[in-house]
Amino acid sequence: MKKSLFLAVAMLVSGSVFATTDHYVLRNDSHIHHLKITTVKGEVTVSTDVDFEPTAAETGREACTADVSGEAKAVSANEIVLRKHLVGEKAVCELKIHLTPTGATIDQSEGCTNFAAGICHFTSDGKELVKIQ
């Protein structure tokens, strides 16, 4: 009984050795941006979501929420690219994620407006999403 319990625990621990998940957050006034990067055995998955309430400068605009996720490609040690295509659309949303030791910045392609409309957008506008420790 002790051996099987030990083996079960060892398998769980050994599987998690190859998995990492990093979370990043940017709160800018009433705009919240969350980024999650998971790496399992060299495969990278990215998930990002935004929740924007209109600021004083955006009076009259609607609040919005948007998200995009999928498998991404590590271009270099500090750059990840996520490409997402909507079925039936020609445009492709491409997010370029630039990692630093303390956070990440995101640039988006024009095609991302199909995923995030109105005041919502995935680009971090040059501001750094802070890595949560």
Image (cartoon, helix red, strand yellow):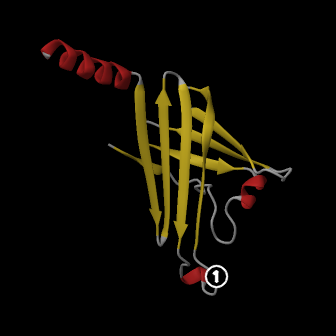
Q: Quadrant of the N terminus?
A: top left
Percent x, y for residue 16?
A: 35, 26
Percent x, y for residue 49?
A: 54, 56
Give the farthest residue toward the left. 2
Point 62% across, 56% down: residue: 122
Dot 1 falls on a residue whose secondary structure is: loop
Judged left or right of residue 12, residue 72 is: right
Give the farthest residue toward the front. 1
Q: Quadrant of residue 118?
A: bottom right
Point 47% across, 71% down: residue: 29
Give the farthest residue toward the right. 90
Residue of label 1? 61
Closer to the camera, 25 or 69? Answer: 69
Closer to the camera, 52 or 28? Answer: 52
The kind of residue on which mark 1 rests is Arg
Judged left or right of residue 66, residue 37 is: left
Q: Residues within 10 Å of mark 1 (few under 14, many from 20)?
A: few
Give the farthest residue toward the bottom. 60
Percent x, y for residue 114?
A: 74, 60
Q: Quadrant of residue 9?
A: top left
Query: Vertically, is 91 above or below 46?
Result: below
Judged left or right of residue 85, residue 3 is: left
Query: Vertically, is 73 above or below 30?
Result: above
Q: Quadrant of the C terminus?
A: top left
Point 65% across, 49% down: residue: 107
Closer to the camera, 133 or 41? Answer: 41
Query: Vertically, is 99 above or below 10?
Result: below
Percent x, y for residue 23?
A: 42, 45
